Image (cartoon, rainbow, N blue to C red):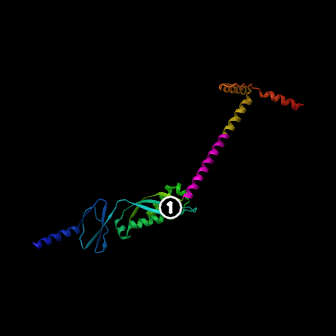
Amino acid sequence: MTGPIMFIVFIIFLLSQWVKILNEYERAVIYQLGRVQKTPRGPGIVFVMWPFEKAKVISSRVVTLDVPPQDIITKDNVSAKVNAVCYFRVVDPIKADVEIQNYQYATSQMAQTTLRSVLGEMDFDDLLTNRETINEKLQSILDKSTDPWGVKVSNVEVKHVDISEDLRKAMARQAEAERERRAKVIAAEGEFEAAEKVCQAAEMMQKTPMALQLRYLQTLVEIGSENNTTTLFPIPIDIFKAMTDKFENK
């Protein structure tokens, strides 16, 4: 009985080594006597003729890589810590296993160095305002660098920019000064427009002197509506003009 049992155990062992079931997102890179086969196998049931063949399973799902905070110095000498997130996936399992020892670790290191080098070439204001341009540049550089490894970088996003407390206070003062400047400019523009309207109104009243008298009467109505005892008598400006002309003639 020992012989048949040992034979059955041996068959089960061979089947466990020969038959592999791969998920939809998995591919098997096959090495046959040390030589890689040109086409990966899977998904589904995959037969591997062990010990002549060896299989390395590679996942083709998107990997979310959290790039740790990096100390950078921008082009205008501002120190900051910046972290990011990178999304990539394996598009060529054979290259991912043959061309690089650990494609995930290599992609992580490449993302960190690229983040430092790209942000070091930009001003701090661009880092805060041009996030979309920075993300596109990071994605393009990383995708080009990881292409020989069979890795496709689909997206890179800068998540957080951490700066010192002194720089935060300086930026707050700068923002407050900018708001005050805009407020003064708006007030000055309002005064300028009001002055233009007053000049236009004066020109119109000069053409029609009765308009000035009507304005006097309107002012009296507005003052009288406030229930006070003040009484005003409008005096035409022409009276003073006649008197000044008389003194000038003397």
Picture quadrant of residue 234: top right
Residue 108 horizontal/vertical position (percent) = 42, 65
Q: What residue type is labelled 1?
A: Lys
Picture quadrant of residue 107: bottom left
Q: Which residue is drawn at 20% across and 68% down?
A: 15
Q: Residue at x 18, y 68 (%)?
A: 12
Q: Name the residue under label 1.
A: 81
| Residue 176 falls inside the magenta stretch | yes
Considering the whole magenta stretch, tell me its main secondary structure.
helix
Q: Give the range drawn in magenta.
A: 165-192
Residue 184 horizontal/vertical position (percent) = 64, 45
Quadrant of the image containing the N terminus: bottom left
Foreground pick, 96 / 173:
173
Q: Residue at x 59, y 53 (%)?
A: 173
| Residue 152 falls inside the magenta stretch | no
Residue 232 horizontal/vertical position (percent) = 73, 25
- Asked whether, in this view, residue 233 is left or right of residue 180, the answer is right
